[in-house]
Amino acid sequence: MTNNANIQNGLTLVLGGTGKSGRRVAERLVARGVPVRVGSRSASPAFSWQDRDGWAAVLEGVCSVYVSYAPDLAVPGASDDIKAFIEAADAAGVRRLVLLSGRGEEEAQVCEGLVRESGLEWTIVRASWFFQNFSESFMIEPLLAGEVVLPVGDVREPFVDVDDIADVAVAALAEDGHVGELYEVTGPRLLTFAQAVQEIAQATGREISYVQISAEDYAAGAREQGVPDDVLEFLMHLFTTVLDGRNAYQTDGIRRALGREPRDFTDFVRETAGSGVWDA
């Protein structure tokens, strides 16, 4: 097993290093004094899942990698990219992989299997729906407009804080004791989307309604608003497959990895409302 000193002294590549989880992982590693290379299209050397010829330059000298796949491991073809990346990482001398995965996604579990069988040290962080999808993603605009319209009913989801996810990933990258672990991470409570929106409304003192519509109507409206086909395909997969109730239970992944409880959605909402991001 690679010891902690070698990992600490080695370069860590953070894929999706400007995204919701990757940015937080990179910041935490830097704060620990771990050398970090951000993997993104805007970095130098640049990283893109579509440019396999450029991977060797990005992987040069790298000891460990945080693998966050965009837009999501659930999309068709993700497993082909992950397989090719693992082979490139192994050839480059990478020793440790930490994969961000999604709950209830068959394609994601195929990717998990590829990581498990890679021969490298691995940890899998399998996450539920992010708190930050309400504050740093496509849901900000409808929240600001005062009406959230989604094709999701009373399904309950144990929304999880991306800060908790990042803490788990950093522990797996920079510490011993997490190799070979699957951490399924959720928040401490089950909430419907309507309940989540209501909490945001109460914290901001604003009128924000939640409206359920059919998947067909949602897709048609998204196309009219110019949502790209690949993004829409991913969203429809989430709303019609992953959010069908299969994930309506909590897990102890954060407690096992970090020895503490996950952050509650109410605390996230209170702090985020104070930042003004949801002010109309």
Image (spheres, rainbow, N blue to C red):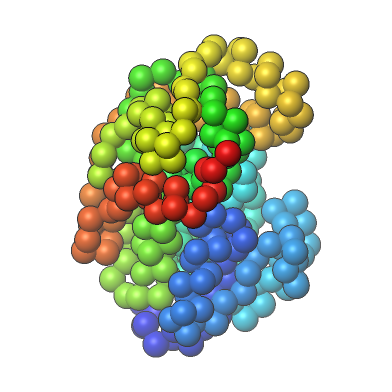
Q: Is residue 117 visible?
A: no
Residue 224 is situated, as x and y percent measured from the top left of the image, at: 75, 21
Q: Is residue 92 above or below residue 218?
A: below
Q: Total number of numbered labels?
A: 0
Give the vertical position of 186 relative to 24 (above or below).
Answer: above
Q: Nearer the viewer, residue 92 or 268?
A: 268
Identify which residue is drawn at 36% across, 83% down: 3
Name the one closer to the observer, 83 or 257: 257
Q: Position of residue 177 (x, y in %)?
A: 28, 71
Image x and y of residue 59, in percent = 65, 72
Q: Is residue 168 visible?
A: yes
Question: Which image quadrant: the N terminus?
Answer: bottom left
Instruction: Judge left or right: residue 235 versus residue 117.
Output: right
Which sits in the foreground, 212 or 80? 212
Q: Residue at x 68, y 19 (%)?
A: 221
Vertical relation: 165 (above or below) 230 = below
At a point 47% along the width and 85% down the height, the residue shown is 33
The structure residue drawn at horizontal position 52% and vertical position 43%, both measured from the top left corner, is 278
Quarter residue 116 falls in? bottom left
Left or right side of 236 for 225: right
